[in-house]
Image (cartoon, rainbow, N blue to C red):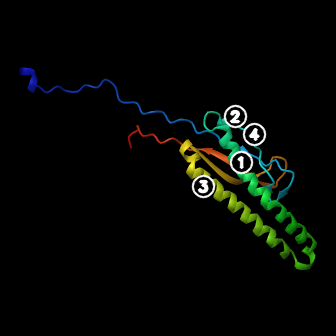
Amino acid sequence: MADFDAIYEDVQDEEPVPAPIPPKLEPIIIRGTGNMTVFGLSSSFNTNFPAGLQSRVAPEEFKATVGRVNNILKKSLPLNIKWLFCGCICCCCTLGCSFWPVICLSKRTQHTINKLLEWENQHLYNKLGLCWRLNKQQCDTNSMLEYVLVIEFLPKIAIYRPD
C-alpha cells in the first residue's frame, strides 16, 4: 500500500525526432495537342494518362476532366477563328482594333476553363492532394507562349508535428 502514493519521475532516454518533411514533387504538365492554336490556347489537350498520377487518380476521372476542358475548347474555337480571320482582313483599316473581339473571346474561354478547373479542384482533386490550373508557359521550340494544364501536388498537412 506504500507504493500507491509514491510519485515516480518519468525518464525519457531520447528526444522525440520530428517526422521528416517529404520532398516536393514536380508538377505534371499537359500540353496542347490540337492542330490549331489561337493566342496560345490550343484546340485540345492530350488525354493520355500520365504515369505520375498513378495510384492518385483514376484514369477515368483524369480523362473526364481533360474531356470537359476539350469540350469547352471545341465549342469556342470555331467562333475565335472566324473573328481572327475577320480581324486579319480588316486589320489595315482599323489599325489593329479588329483583333479585340478575338482577344475578348480568348479571355472568356480561359476564364471558363479556369472556372471549370476550380470547380473540379473543390469537388474532387483537392481532397486527393492535387490542384489543376491553366498556366501560361514558354514553348520548348520557340519563344512563343502557350497555355498548358498544370497538375500540382498539394503538400500533406503534418498533423503529428508540433507547432
Q: Which amino acid type is marked by label 4?
A: Asn
Mark 1 vs mark 2, foreground winner is 1
The residue furthest bottom is: 93
Q: Position of residue 96 (x, y in %)?
A: 86, 74
Label 3 to label 2: alpha-carbon separation: 24 Å
Label 1 with label 3: CB-CB less than 8 Å: no
The residue at the point 73 percent across, 65 percent down is 107
Disc 4 element? loop
How many numbered markers are drawn? Answer: 4
Residue 147 visible in image: no
| Mark 2 Cα shell of 10 Å, populated few (<14), some (14-19), many (≥20) | few
The residue beneath circle 4 is: 48
The residue at the point 90 percent across, 67 percent down is 85
Tag 2 or tag 3, which sits nearer the N-term? 2
103 is higher (above) or lower (below) than 35 = below
Q: Position of residue 99 (x, y in %)?
A: 83, 71
Residue 109: image quadrant is: bottom right
The image quadrant where one finds the N terminus is top left
Q: Which amino acid type is marked by label 3?
A: Trp
Residue 101 visible in image: yes
The image quadrant where one finds the C terminus is top left
Residue 98: image quadrant is: bottom right
| Mark 4 Cα shell of 10 Å, populated few (<14), some (14-19), many (≥20) | few
* Residue 66's disc number: 1
Q: Position of residue 162 (x, y in %)?
A: 38, 40
Q: Which amino acid type is marked by label 2?
A: Ala
Label 1 to label 2: alpha-carbon separation: 16 Å
* Residue 119's disc number: 3
The residue beneath circle 2 is: 51
Mark 3 vs mark 2, foreground winner is 3
Instruction: Judge left or right: residue 134 versus residue 101.
Output: left
